[in-house]
Amino acid sequence: MIGKGRFKKKNGPVYSVDQMYNGILKRDRSSLARAITLIESNAEQHFSQSQELLERILPHSGKSLRIGITGVPGAGKSTFIEAFGVYLCELGLRVAVLAVDPSSSISGGSILGDKTRMEQLSRHPLAFIRPSPSGGKLGGVHRKTRETMLLCEAAGFDVILVETVGVGQSEAIIRDMVDFFMMLVLTGAGDELQGMKKGIMELIDAAIVNKADGENRPLAIKTKEEYNRILHFLQPATFGWKTKAYTCSALFKEGVEQIWTMLQQFEKTTKDSGIFAERRRIQNKHWLYSLISDQLHFRFFKQSGIKRALPILEEEVMNGKKTVASAVDELFLIERNS
């Protein structure tokens, strides 16, 4: 931190919150990138600066359509996002793509170099692609991805596409921060449907059967029908909206227009009914409690007394000398007396 309200990247120039704020409102991509880097930082001194910036841009956010995209590896998420993103850009819409990897708190990495996989979209002047900040201190993926979305909205992006790796907890995390959630699936869904968790199917607003081209097209249509039969018996993720399956070929850009028409209908339907605004209100509430939990976790383990006692108690628990419950009680006693 260089003076009050100033941010300095390592070995880089100093930028004030004012400069980043004004640059974002002017749709300056460099200012947006710097602001996201500020949010990414796990340094405690940067946390207050990022929150000051977000408080100021908050009135300028919230106007985009937030779309979550998941799917198993091989379903063609990157190809679809590029084709869909370019289509939207050619309509004159500004598109931001955020790639989320909740597992990165373990590996420390990010999703597989999204800009190299979306070369055409990354070069488009109306597009912005950014790997979402990884997990870590002061909020992790929940806070950082949400706050990155707010910055992109304040910078005037009309559509935000949030891509996830499509495994584990990622679907539930992304469902809780987007307006519309779609899942890309492979053809030949019989075995896949047998092994698919019902919970994931109930999170989505649409299933997209990609790669519906050439000899694969008849199988893609059959797969779409199979998904529609399953979805018919499940509780829709969004009240007043019927979750359906669609086919497309991202490679040949077929079906992309139909998907955008469907998304526009979803937005109109949910806004007219009030579901759109209510979902965002509930998501903000969940975000509040998520951040409380993250902050408590961070502050607990940060305390010097906890740092000293934890390895000793870990060893005693692992060796069967102390119960887990008594070890936890002892840690909280240390925390209360700190």
Image (spheres, grey):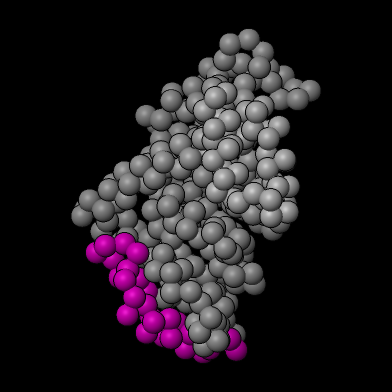
Residue 226 in the magenta stretch? The answer is yes
Give percent across and percent down for residue 27. 52, 32
Tell me where residue 333 sits by quadrant. top right
Answer yes or no: is residue 46 visible: no
The residue positioned 46% from the left and 68% from the top of the image is 200
On screen, residue 165 versus residue 235, left or right, reads: right
The image quadrant where one finds the N terminus is: top right
Direction from residue 67 to residue 318 in the image, left or right: right
Seen as rendered, the residue at the extreme top is 3
- Who is closer to the viewer here, 175 or 252? 175
Q: Give residue 222's position: percent from left, percent from top.
A: 47, 88
Where is residue 170, by image quadrant? bottom right
Q: Nearer the viewer, residue 52 or 215?
A: 52
Q: What residue is at 35 percent from the left and 64 percent from the top?
A: 237
User: In the picture shown, does residue 53 fall above or below 211?
Assistant: above
The structure residue drawn at horizontal position 79% and vertical position 23%, both measured from the top left corner, is: 11
Q: Main secondary structure of the magenta part?
A: helix
Q: Is residue 155 magenta?
A: no
Q: Answer with left or right where residue 235 lies relative to residue 227.
A: left
The image position of residue 89, as x and y in percent, is: 51, 51
Q: Magenta residues, as a range?
A: 215-244
For the C terminus, the image quarter is top right
Q: Is residue 140 visible?
A: yes
Residue at (68%, 35%) from the top-left corner? 309
Q: Quadrant of residue 191?
A: bottom right
- 264, above or below 45, in the image: below
The correct choice, above or below, for 124 with respect to 331 in the image is below
**Residue 129 horizontal/vertical position (percent):** 61, 47
> Looking at the image, which is closer to me, 13 or 200?
200
